């Protein structure tokens, strides 16, 4: 018989004193740091410890005794459950302050190199309905909340359309209304869910890997074009036709309606055939008169209005005069490359994903940009001394890597190439700070500009300008 697990304590009357990583809050009890989700600095609460380590503990708020003065009422009924917006209970002005501090902490504690005063963070004009892309999962076994379980109520119909619970591939929270995208997205999702129920469609079983209704992606651009991609788990042509024709009839505003038959174990559609049902196979986003085609597999910043601000910052900090050769590393679908093309002599974009490079070439062609080139491949393999010798020494490099930051071999090639200026755009200030410490061998930071792309989350974009030390 195994040893009985020790009961972890309930800490009474603990004050939350700060925010912490991953959207959590922080308290101190004696010499122990306690990380707590959904707390606000100033809260006094009873905290139940869930996990205890040598130097810290993790817990949850059992009861708020005295709420913080800064607390606001969350708009979403799913707050604390879906895991998407961990800061809805904090005023937006305070969220921005925390994000600015996150950037400063990364530079101080990780980069540990000199930097100028950080420019005040650029906030989002829209803090609701700002996302242009949402993805939902259909499930035959809705995740039951603790309140639902405690109610002892029966839930015979557990079909759901919503979001995965963080860290659980087979648990889906049924979403009644998400406030992060235009409400059209909610209406499309709920229509498909109810239509599936009425017509006896099998909702996907995430453990057994079978079912008809599987996932749904909705994209809505700032130009009011709408894409819906319905993913089904089996190739039942009669059901597909019935479902798609009714979606098209119910939502004539959808400009690109497609479906995917995905019989794989995982939900990714990057390797699947997209079958256009109605309208174009893409939608278009616009920025300063430039058009950007977005297909079902394309990457595009999910906050269109803030993307314009972000790219404008990057362009301004690059100090372009019209004579520069610019390398745009991690170019994606070439958005930044096309955005700066009219201000430079030539721009070369490099990206790992071949499909993204094809999109980048199309975007350049659509906008009649003749001074762009795009290359696909792993950055550390493509960006070599030989590549630079063949294509020319860059005057400016703009880098926008994924959350993991840059491979150290890429940093080395950048240092060897020694462009006059580097603009580093990052969605992860911690890995950015690590890379900045390496670049400090030859470069000084001249500007730091945070940009908030995702209100009500802990995520922040940061743009850093660097100048070659003479």
Image (spheres, rainbow, N blue to C red):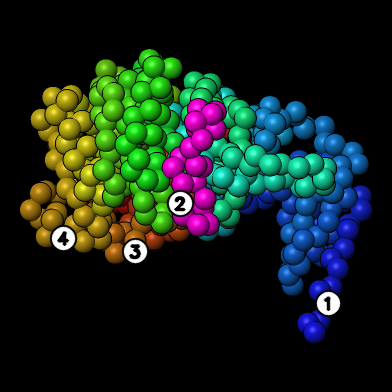
Q: Which residue is mark 1?
A: 4
Q: Which residue is mark 4?
A: 385
Q: Nearer the viewer, residue 207 or 81?
A: 207
Residue 69 falls inside the magenta stretch: no
Q: Residue at x 67, y 30 (%)?
A: 76
Name the residue located 63 percent from the left edge and 42 percent from the top edge.
158
Q: CA distance from mark 1 to mark 4?
A: 61 Å
Residue 56: where, in percent of width, then height? 74, 65
Indicate the position of residue 216 as horizontal and vertical percent values.
44, 36
Question: In the rendered image, which residue does mark 3 sit on?
Answer: 408
Residue interval drawn in magenta? 193-213
Q: Main secondary structure of the magenta part?
A: loop
- Which is more toward the observer, 148 or 321? 148
The answer to whether 85 is drawn above or below residue 168 in the figure is above
Mark 3 residue element: helix
Mark 4 is surrounded, within 10 Å at the Cα level, by few (under 14), some (14 to 19) or many (20 or more) other residues, namely few
Which is in the foreground here, disc 1 or disc 4? 1
Q: Are marks 3 and 4 in contact (CB under 8 Å)?
A: no
Total labels: the figure holds 4
243 over 145 or under it: above or below: above
- According to the picture, the residue beneath numbered tag 2 turns out to be 210
Tell me the distance, in whole angstroms, between the alpha carbons under discs 4 and 2.
50 Å
Which element is circle 1 on?
loop
Q: Are the residues at dot 1 and dot 4 in contact (C-beta closer than 8 Å)?
A: no
Query: Which badge, 1 or 4, is on the more N-terminal residue?
Result: 1
Picture residue at 32% right of the left edge, 36% below the top = 237
The answer to whether residue 68 of the structure is visible from this angle is: yes
């Amino acid at each position: 018989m195994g040893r009985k697990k020790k009961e972890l304590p309930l800490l009474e009357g603990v004050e939350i004193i700060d925010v912490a990583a991953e959207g959590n809050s922080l308290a101190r009890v004696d010499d122990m740091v306690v990380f707590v989700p959904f707390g606000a600095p100033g809260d006094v609460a009873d905290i139940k410890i869930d996990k205890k380590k040598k130097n810290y503990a993790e817990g949850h708020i059992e009861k708020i005794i005295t709420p913080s003065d800064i607390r606001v009422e969350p708009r979403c009924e799913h707050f604390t459950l879906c895991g998407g917006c961990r800061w809805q209970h904090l005023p937006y002005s305070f969220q921005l302050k925390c994000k600015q501090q996150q950037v400063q902490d990364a530079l101080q504690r990780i980069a540990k190199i000199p930097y100028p005063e950080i420019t005040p963070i650029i906030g989002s004009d829209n803090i609701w309905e700002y996302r242009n892309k949402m993805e939902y999962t259909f499930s035959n076994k809705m995740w039951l909340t603790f309140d639902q379980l405690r109610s002892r109520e029966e839930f015979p119909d557990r079909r759901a359309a919503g979001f995965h619970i963080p860290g659980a591939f087979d648990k889906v929270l049924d979403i009644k209304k998400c406030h992060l995208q235009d409400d059209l997205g909610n209406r499309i999702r709920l229509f498909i869910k109810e239509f599936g129920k009425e017509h006896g469609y099998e909702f996907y079983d995430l453990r057994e890997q079978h079912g008809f209704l599987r996932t749904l992606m909705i994209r809505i651009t700032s130009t009011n074009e709408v894409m819906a991609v319905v993913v089904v788990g089996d190739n039942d042509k009669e059901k597909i036709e019935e479902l798609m024709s009714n979606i098209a009839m119910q939502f004539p505003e959808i400009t690109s309606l497609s479906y995917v038959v995905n019989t794989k174990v995982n939900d990714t559609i990057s390797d699947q055939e997209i079958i256009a049902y109605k309208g174009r196979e893409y939608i278009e986003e616009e920025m300063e008169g430039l058009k950007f085609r977005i297909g079902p597999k394309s990457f595009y910043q999910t906050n269109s209005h803030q993307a314009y601000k972000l790219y404008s910052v990057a362009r301004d900090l690059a100090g372009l005069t019209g004579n520069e050769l610019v390398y745009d590393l991690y170019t994606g679908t070439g958005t930044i490359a096309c955005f700066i093309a009219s201000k430079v002599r030539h721009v070369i974009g490099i990206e790992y994903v071949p499909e993204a490079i094809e999109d980048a070439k199309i975007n350049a062609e659509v906008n009649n940009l003749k001074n762009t080139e795009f290359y696909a491949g792993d950055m550390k393999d493509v960006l070599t001394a030989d590549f630079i010798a063949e294509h020319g020494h860059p005057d400016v490099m703009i880098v926008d890597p994924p959350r993991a930051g840059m491979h150290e071999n890429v940093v080395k090639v950048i240092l060897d190439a020694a462009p006059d200026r580097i603009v580093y755009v990052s969605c992860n200030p911690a890995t950015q700070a690590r890379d900045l410490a390496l670049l400090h061998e030859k470069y000084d930071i001249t500007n730091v500009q945070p940009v908030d792309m995702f209100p009500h989350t802990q995520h922040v974009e940061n743009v850093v300008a660097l100048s070659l030390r003479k």
